[in-house]
């Protein structure tokens, strides 16, 4: 996984936007994206959903009830093989 991202509040949802330079590996089945505090496991994290876009700009709408500041990482995880595919730091301590 590579590329830029940003997040914002649109008044109803938290919008996680991935940039034009976003790329993810299409070779792995069952790729999911999470918010988590551990960059090596989705355990205790929030599952955003299944990855359906593997290249280019797109966004995920998260419920406003998500406490975004409670998570440090975006994690890409292959469910069938229980393996990390990539991560990005949301917030630095």
Image: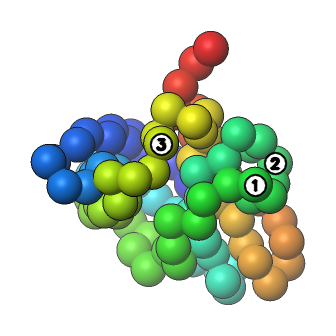
- Residue 25 x %, y %: 59, 68
Secondary structure at badge 3 equals loop
Residue highlighted by disc 3: 67
Number of marks: 3
Picture residue at 51% right of the left edge, 73% below the top: 49
Judge by depth and name the residue closer to the eye, 6 or 85: 6
Q: Is residue 64 above or below residue 27?
A: above
* 66 or 41: nearer the viewer: 66
Residue 83 shows up from this direction: yes
Which residue, given by chain and number where applicable, does mark 1 sit on? 44
Tag 2 and tag 3, C-beta contact below 8 Å: no
Left or right: residue 27 compared with residue 51: right
Callout 1: 10 Å neighbours few (<14), some, many (20+)?
A: few
User: Would residue 17 be visible to someone looking at this image?
Assistant: no
Q: Which residue in the structure is indicated by mark 2?
A: 40
Residue 29: x and y in percent read 67, 85
Front of the two marks 2 and 3: 3
Sequence-first disc among 1 and 3: 1
Q: Position of residue 50 (x, y in %)?
A: 53, 78
Marks 2 and 3, the one that precedes in the sequence: 2
Give the alpha-carbon distance from disc 2 to disc 3, as whole Å. Answer: 20 Å
**Residue 44's spot in the image, x, y percent?**
75, 54
Is the C-beta separation of discs 1 and 2 under 8 Å?
Answer: no
- What's the CA distance linking mark 1 and mark 3? 13 Å
What crowding class fits label 3: few (fewer than 14 Cα within 10 Å), some (14-19), or many (20 or more)?
few
- Mark 1 and mark 2: Cα distance apart in space: 12 Å
At x 44% / y 71%, what residue is drawn?
A: 54
State the residue lying farthest toward the front: 65
Secondary structure, mark 1, is loop
């Amino acid at each position: 996984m590579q590329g830029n991202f940003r997040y914002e509040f649109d008044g109803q949802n938290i919008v996680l936007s991935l940039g034009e330079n976003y790329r993810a590996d299409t070779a792995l089945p069952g790729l999911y994206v999470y918010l988590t505090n551990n960059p090596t496991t989705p355990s205790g994290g929030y599952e955003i959903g299944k990855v359906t876009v593997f290249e280019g700009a797109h966004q995920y709408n998260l419920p406003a009830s998500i406490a975004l500041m409670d998570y440090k990482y975006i994690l890409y995880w292959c469910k069938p093989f229980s393996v990390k595919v990539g991560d990005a730091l949301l917030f630095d301590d």
